[in-house]
Image (cartoon, rainbow, N blue to C red):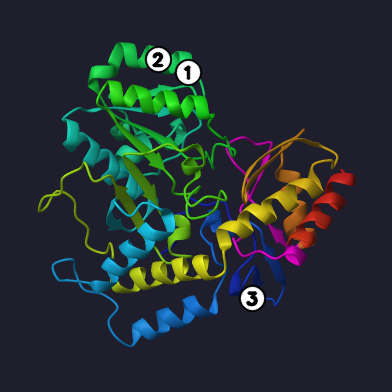
Amino acid sequence: MNLFNVYPLFNINPVKAQGSFLWDDKGEKYLDFYGGHAVISIGHNHPHYQAQLKNQLDKISFYSNSVQNELQTELAEKLGKLSGLEDYNLFLCNSGAEANENALKLASFHNGKSKVLYFSGSFHGRTSAAVSVTDNPKIVAPVNYDERFIKSEWNNIEQLEKVFEKHGNEISSVIIEGIQGVGGIMIPTIEFLIKIKQLCEKYYAVLILDEVQSGYGRSGYFFAHQEFGIEADIITTAKGMGNGFPIGGVLIHPKFQASNGLLGTTFGGNHLACVAAIAVLDVMKDENLIGNAQKMGEYIENKIKDFPHIKTIRRKGLMIGIELDRDCSEVRNNLLYNHHIFTGNSNDKTVLRILPALNIKKEETDLFINALKEVLENI
């Protein structure tokens, strides 16, 4: 049997990782400035994270959600405290797409409506409803397409108001990323978010903040939308939540009522996943990684802002989009193959996406800064 060939692969096979570095099967060392799509939040194989998982393996790694699991309770309590959302409730699942599926379903259960408003440039996952609110026709199969899903332009308040005037009484939820990642690090304006919140309240629609990539300290706030003082009805998270262990979560405002069987999952909230997520929160708190994301992100921006071929820098914390005056693929490949630095791209082909671990150190950022300068000066 062969693998189903859906991924364009770099000819690199990482076999070891530590902190912000990877080593391939030939012994070559790479700086990880992408974290596998913002997944690596506290660095590869952090000693506390590693120790907690190893310790849990000696106890129990899995049982179903038909029994009590005190690790889920501990995770919910610590997440509530560090995020400042202690009055919310937590549903645990396995991925960002699954979190968004459950969020959309919960919203529809709550108000009995079926239409969903999403935005241009969005990416919310590849599963049924999640891909239907993703702005990429190439990955939306005919079975996923439905007129219940309505697209509006990003940061366009006038069009937003027109959509609500026409469909407001039918709109169950509005789903928006705290910061668009795949879309090219696109940041919503405070005016746009406030208007969405006002319209959701007026028309009894649920506001879902997708913080799968922009959450967990990535933006310099626990969740990106918290910078603007916006209260979401539902928040979804995943990627950095487990530092590589598959886990997702739905943070649910207390106005939503739970009932037996309303939501469910086989693997969500299993013992190993919870231990991984608890370890991430412990490290984030003990090492002040949200503060470090703010500091290091600002440092990188200030160092690179005057480099040639950079048109704009879109940044919150360590979620950085570097817009070039050309397709970024040449720069990305040069950084990878000649300087051994992993970076990312986006649906905007000119944007180089930078998502290092939140505990990145100054000397590691300097490796990236110096390499980027050399690459851009020699184009």
**Is residue 106 among what the camera can see?**
yes
- On screen, residue 114 above or below 53: above
Instruction: For mark 2, give the secondary structure.
Output: helix
Query: In the rendered structure, are the residues bearing label 1 and label 2 in contact, judged by CB atoms less than 8 Å apart?
Result: yes
Q: Which residue is mark 2?
A: 161
**Is residue 147 among what the camera can see?**
no
Single out the residue that lies furthest toward the left.
260
- Name the one closer to the observer, 362 or 1: 362
Q: In the displayed structure, does residue 73 sit left or right of residue 358?
A: left
Please give the name of the residue rendered at 67% of the width and 55% of the height, measured from the top-left corner: 295
Quadrant (top left, top right, bottom left, bottom right) of the N terminus: bottom left
Q: For the residue carrying disc 3, how many other residues have a C-alpha within 10 Å: few (<14), some (14-19), or many (20+)?
A: few
Q: Is residue 327 magenta?
A: no
Q: In the displayed structure, does residue 373 sit left or right of residue 47?
A: right
Q: Which residues are magenta?
A: 340-364
Please give the name of the residue rendered at 57% of the width and 35% of the height, measured from the top-left corner: 186
Q: For the residue carrying disc 1, how many other residues have a C-alpha within 10 Å: few (<14), some (14-19), or many (20+)?
A: some
- Name the one closer to the observer, 188 or 291: 291
Q: Which residue is mark 3?
A: 25
> Please, what is the dominant secondary structure of the magenta stretch?
loop
| Residue 6 place in picture, x, y as percent | 48, 50
Q: Which residue is mark 1?
A: 157
Give the Cα separation between the discs numbered 1 and 2. Answer: 6 Å
| Residue 126 place in picture, x, y as percent | 38, 44
| Residue 75 place in picture, x, y as percent | 33, 66
